[in-house]
Amino acid sequence: MKKFKLNLQRHAIPNPDLIEQKKNDIKQRLNQALKEGNENDFAQAFTEFADDLQQSVIQEAQSIVANVDRQVLATRGVRQLTSEENNYYQKVIEAMKSADPKQALTTLDVVLPTTTIDAVFEDLTVNHPLLSAIDFQNAGAVTEWLLNSNPRQLASWSPLCAEIVKELTSGFRKIDLQQNKLSAFIPVCKAMLDLGPVWLDRYVRTILAEALALGLEDGILSGRGQTLNLHEPIGMRKNLAGSVDPNTGYPDKSKVALNALDPITYGNLLATLSETENGNPRIVNDVILVVNPKDYLTKIMPATTPRATDGTYTRDVFPFPTTVIQSVVMAEGEAILGIGNRYLMAAGTGKSGKIEYSDEYRFLEDERVYLTKFYGHGQPKDNNSFILLDVTNLKPTVMEVKVTNIDEFPVA
């Protein structure tokens, strides 16, 4: 009787938990490299992440390679390309496979389609609650953006005088999107190119989404702004009216202590959001509360989880419509309360919109590294849309029970 030796290591099905753990470990390394400003560590970690992503895409493609029907692919979650997207990726693949990809990509006459960037933004907003709560715009190739910080609209039956024109135009600010640049590196192996446009699109979109997500959340919450030495968004926690330092940017807002979440305390706090920085009233329909995960579990959750009379609990109960967003970027003891859509983040590919060949980073064999540049800027639409909170002493909500209509029992 013959004995067969089975290589379990080779035929093992990847453990989803281990894959997710490895992904989180790489993200922690990326965040640490960002904080330390270590470009080499960041590039190595990101290249490792990209390689893992490539392998997962390749395995998925190979598992359904026989299913060439577009409808079958669509039912399995594979995004179908427009004719413009298909043409773009076909030409990019040809250029990447050429003997001189740098020259081939330089002379390429197609740019990354707007629909692809729209799809990247859709992926981002689905997977990142903070990005779905703000005004997240695809600027395309636009390099300047007009922001209306004054929602109050004036109407006049008389001819427009100088004062009315001045007030109408005072709320508009011009934002230069080219000052802040994100270079997203895309390591591509030959096996990935052989899969065709549909799978290259999936890989590129995921890489771009992850690259954007790494820096966006920190920039939206804590970005220091644009100066001669800084090129960052202006975070929700920043005071737009404060003195701007060339090295540290905009100052933080003064913290407001939040010690209770009863209707009166919370209502008075929200009332400060119901006026613009110019003193004009506005309607506040709902707000977001961004908080550190540990603070959520130890402070926000106990303060917003009342117990019903039947013994069950209801989570995230606020006196006013509030969406809680947990973020590791927020420091413990702090939170940001505000009107989500009053933060604008505009990003796009700039004028060229091309994927370029890069000689700068290359850590894996049989790979070529490409990059694409995103330009963008984010900032609150006015200085009165967000509040920086101190939640250190936030107390749990205790349900008050009152007993009425007590019958007097006769004393025997």
Image: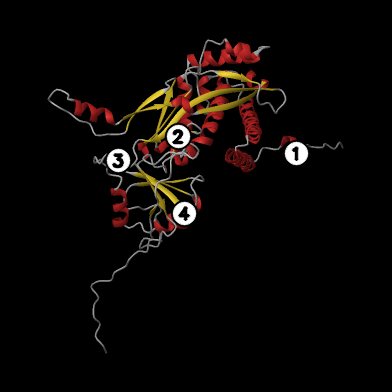
Of callouts 2 and 4, which one flags the residue occurring earlier in the amino acid sequence?
Answer: 2
Q: Check disc 1 and report its element: helix, strand or loop.
A: helix
Of callouts 1 and 3, which one flags the residue occurring earlier in the amino acid sequence?
Answer: 1
> In the shown orientation, is residue 211 left or right of residue 264?
right
Which circle marks residue 36 in the picture? none
Which residue is the site of mark 2?
125
Of callouts 3 and 4, which one flags the residue occurring earlier in the amino acid sequence?
Answer: 3
Q: Residues within 10 Å of mark 4 (few under 14, many from 20)?
A: some
Question: Which amino acid, by three-letter code, is at mark 4?
Answer: Gly
Quote the CA–CA distance across marks 1 and 4.
Answer: 48 Å
Quote the CA–CA distance across marks 1 and 2.
Answer: 39 Å
Residue at image position (61%, 11%) is 104
Name the residue at the right extreme. Answer: 1
Q: Nearer the viewer, residue 396 or 339?
A: 339
Residue at image position (55%, 32%) is 211
Of callouts 3 and 2, which one flags the residue occurring earlier in the amino acid sequence?
Answer: 2
Of callouts 1 and 4, which one flags the residue occurring earlier in the amino acid sequence?
Answer: 1
Name the residue at the bottom extreme. Answer: 412
Select label 3 or label 2 by which is in front.
Answer: 3
Q: Residues within 10 Å of mark 3 (few under 14, many from 20)?
A: some
Which residue is the site of mark 1?
8
Residue at image position (49%, 49%) is 331
Q: Nearer the viewer, residue 245 or 388?
A: 245
Of callouts 1 and 2, which one flags the residue occurring earlier in the amino acid sequence?
Answer: 1
Residue 372 is at least partly visible in this image: yes
Quadrant including the C terminus: bottom left
Question: Which amino acid, by three-letter code, is at mark 3?
Answer: Glu
Question: Which amino acid, by three-letter code, is at mark 2?
Answer: Thr
